DNA sequence: ACAAATTGGACCGAATTGGTCCGCTATAGG
DNA sequence: CCTATAGCGGACCAATTCGGTCCAATTTGT
């Protein structure tokens, strides 16, 4: 199973591209060139990110996008939520009345905690960490310090 | 965004239904009646669970399904993996060669850890915990009340 | 032999997704 | 004032996936 939609995946790449240089103002075409993604798609993604308030946009000639906040203050969960919508394991997690079975579903009450755990796993990653791959890593394959790994490997699963 | 497919959601319900009484052997129709899900769909789900080795099946008349292991030893991640496939955030998480961008994708190395964290969040929940008491009082429509359990085990309930 | 039950796969309509395109608006510079 | 540039909003369609059903085959107790 694939959890993130392809667009959300690309959205993270786009956001990471902007995070690489917070000061620079990049047009959609520039980001598309940098990420080697289709221009139209990148534009669509940036629009979604802008509407969510993650990036700020300036119109007109010499316009473009830039990150609205510090890359360390933007979590991955925000990025994917901007594109895929709020995170929810089941239908009743996002809109309760979407499922006709809510009344007599025995498993429904339990999903909230799990939902929370998954969301936390994504919220624990800041955009900054996606753009600084080798900050914590020795020239091997490790990407995360043990501390970091510990942090995301054990999300609070307390019902 | 909805992470679990509807089938996976239902699969958990079906598995939970079996976990409610590990000893009894229930036919697909009986489980369908107990969960109020379409018979054909339940049958399909049970087949998937059986192929994954989570439930054991006996064919022929007086056949049926039962949980293969102890409900405390079956994690939710196994159940959803049996139906939706292995858990992976992105395409490269499940099959590396699925995405043509693997070579120059800057975010790819980071997903593994996140992927792991999400998987762990699901693996931390045992099937046993889904069958535990209600957190709210169902208005006389509890699915897994003892009375209902009798009906599940009843071989002759084919509506 | 018959009936009840699982097995495996085919099947189709519906819904979602990925990706593109258009007309509109805003802004800088000449 | 005019024009080129760039974001904005949404419509649009092809392709894929998903949900659900159904059937032929097989196994097993009576
Ligand atoms: S109510 Fe039950 S069946 Fe409906 S979405 Fe929630 S968990 Fe799934
Ligand atoms: S390689 Fe990059 S673009 Fe491709 S699936 Fe992995 S993360 Fe997404």
Image (cartoon, coloured by chain):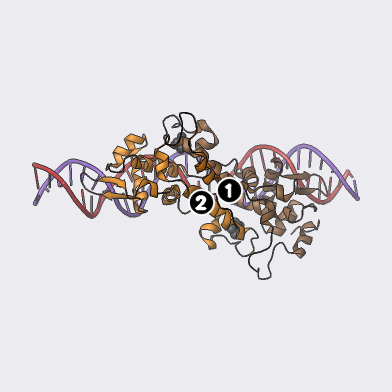
Chain colours: A orange, B brown, C red, D purple
| Quadrant of the image containing the N terminus of chain A | top right
Q: Under 8 Å from ligand 1: the CB of mark 2?
A: no
Identify which residue is drawn at 74% across, 48% down: B70
Seen from the viewer's position, the closer of residues D12 and A87 is A87
| D26 vs B15: above or below | above
Is residue B150 shown to the viewer in this render?
Answer: yes
Q: How many labels does the image show?
A: 2
Provide residue A53's location: percent of width, then percent of height. 35, 53
- Chain letter for mark 1, please: B
Q: In this view, does B14 lie to the left or right of A32?
A: right
- Callout 1 and callout 2 share a chain: no
Identify which residue is drawn at 56% across, 53% down: A156
- Residue matched to label 2: A120
- Chain letter for mark 2, please: A
Mark 2 nearby-residue class (10 Å; few <14, some 14–19, many ≥20): many
Classify mark 1: helix, strand or loop.
helix
Classify mark 2: helix, strand or loop.
helix
| B31 vs B97: above or below | below
Seen from the viewer's position, the closer of residues A18 and D30 is A18
Provide residue A25's location: percent of width, then percent of height. 27, 43
| Quadrant of the image containing the C terminus of chain A | bottom right
Q: In this view, does A78 lie to the left or right of A112?
A: left
Occupied quadrant, residue A61: top left
Q: Could you tell me if the residues under marks 1 and 2 are in contact, i.e. CB atoms within 8 Å? A: yes
Q: Is residue C13 left or right of residue A136?
A: right
Label drawn at residue B121: 1
Is residue A89 shown to the viewer in this render?
Answer: no
| B94 vs B130: above or below | above
Identify which residue is drawn at 23% across, 46% down: A63
Provide residue A103's location: percent of width, then percent of height. 61, 65
Q: In this view, does C27 lie to the left or right of B114?
A: left
């Amino acid at each position: 199973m694939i959890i993130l939609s392809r667009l959300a995946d690309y959205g993270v790449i786009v956001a990471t591209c902007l995070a690489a240089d917070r000061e620079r103002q990049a047009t959609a075409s520039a980001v598309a060139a940098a990420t080697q993604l289709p221009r139209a798609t990148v534009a669509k993604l940036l629009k979604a990110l802008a509407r969510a308030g993650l990036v700020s946009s300036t119109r007109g000639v010499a316009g473009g996008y830039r990150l609205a906040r510090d890359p360390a203050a933007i979590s991955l969960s925000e990025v994917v939520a901007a594109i895929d919508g709020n995170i929810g394991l089941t239908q009743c997690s996002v809109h309760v009345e979407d499922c006709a079975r809510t009344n007599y579903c025995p498993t429904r009450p339990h999903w909230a905690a799990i939902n929370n755990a998954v969301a936390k796993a994504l919220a624990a990653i800041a955009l900054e960490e996606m753009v600084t791959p080798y900050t914590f890593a020795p020239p091997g394959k490790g990407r995360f310090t043990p501390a970091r790994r510990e942090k995301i490997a054990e999300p609070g699963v307390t019902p």
